[in-house]
Amino acid sequence: MGVNSGNMLDHDILIIGAGLAGMRAALSAKEQGADVAVVSKVHPVRSHSNAAQGGINAALTDRGDDWRDHAYDTIKGSDFLGDQDAIALMCQEAGDEVIAMEHMGAIFNRDEEGLGTIAFGGQREARTFFVADFTGQALLHVLYEQIVKAGALVYEEWFVLSLIVRDGKCGGAVMM
């Protein structure tokens, strides 16, 4: 947990924002042994990731899908304006991440073959994994449970006023 020296708190990593990306990053850093804190304007399960109702696109190779097809559909959906290297990396990792979220406790919809999917978001294949119509909310709750279990500190209802930057490197934040 953060060291308090006067009014100064100290952590290896401070993640600003407790949406799905922020909490997943916090969990990964904590698993690597870092002292992690998350700062959020709202309680983490109330972040804007609640608005993500539709689902998560991911190619599962054991179903005969290929991350390259997922990447192409995603790039095409961006009218070829998306960062293609970032999209490729995301699509390579997406299948493992969906399975990891399920193992953490996300209860995705099911069909007779296991995890249920629909074709969504410009995908040519049925590769959208979902939790009814509240996927974002369900995943937020799972990730929040995991970061609490892992011992990541959450500064809930704190506001970042400015970043502390020296020699072009961010070394902290002024928060209230």
Image (cartoon, rainbow, N blue to C red):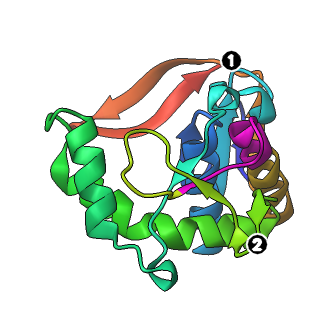
Q: Residues within 10 Å of mark 2 (few under 14, many from 20)?
A: few
Q: Tell which circle, 2 or 1, labels the residue nearer the N-terminal end.
A: 2
Task: Identify whether 165 is placed above or below 42.
Answer: below
**Relative depth, front residue between 18 and 79:** 79
Distance (Cα) linking label 2 and label 1: 50 Å
The amino acid pointed to by label 2 is: Glu
| Residue 46 appears anywhere in the view | yes
The quarter holding residue 26 reads bottom right
**Residue pushed farthest bottom?**
62
Task: Identify whether 78 is placed above or below 33.
Answer: above
| Count of numbered circles on the image | 2
In x, y percent, where is residue 4?
Answer: 73, 43
**Relative depth, front residue between 163 and 10:** 163
**Residue pushed farthest left?**
80
For residue 176, which numbered disc appears in the image?
A: 1
Q: Which residue in the structure is indicated by mark 2?
A: 112
Task: Identify whether 71 is placed above or below 61.
Answer: above
In x, y percent, where is residue 15?
Answer: 56, 42
Give yes or no for residue 132 being in the magenta stretch: yes
- Determine whether the residue tagged by mark 1 lies in a helix, strand or loop: loop
Question: Which residue is located at x 76 percent, y 36 percent?
Answer: 134
Q: Which residues are magenta?
A: 128-140
Query: What quarter of the picture does the N terminus occupy?
Result: bottom right
Question: Which residue is located at x 51 percent, y 29 percent?
Answer: 173
* Cβ–Cβ under 8 Å for marks 2 and 1: no
| Residue 33 appears anywhere in the view | no
The amino acid pointed to by label 1 is: Met
The quarter holding residue 105 reads bottom right
Task: Identify whether 144 is placed above or below 35.
Answer: above
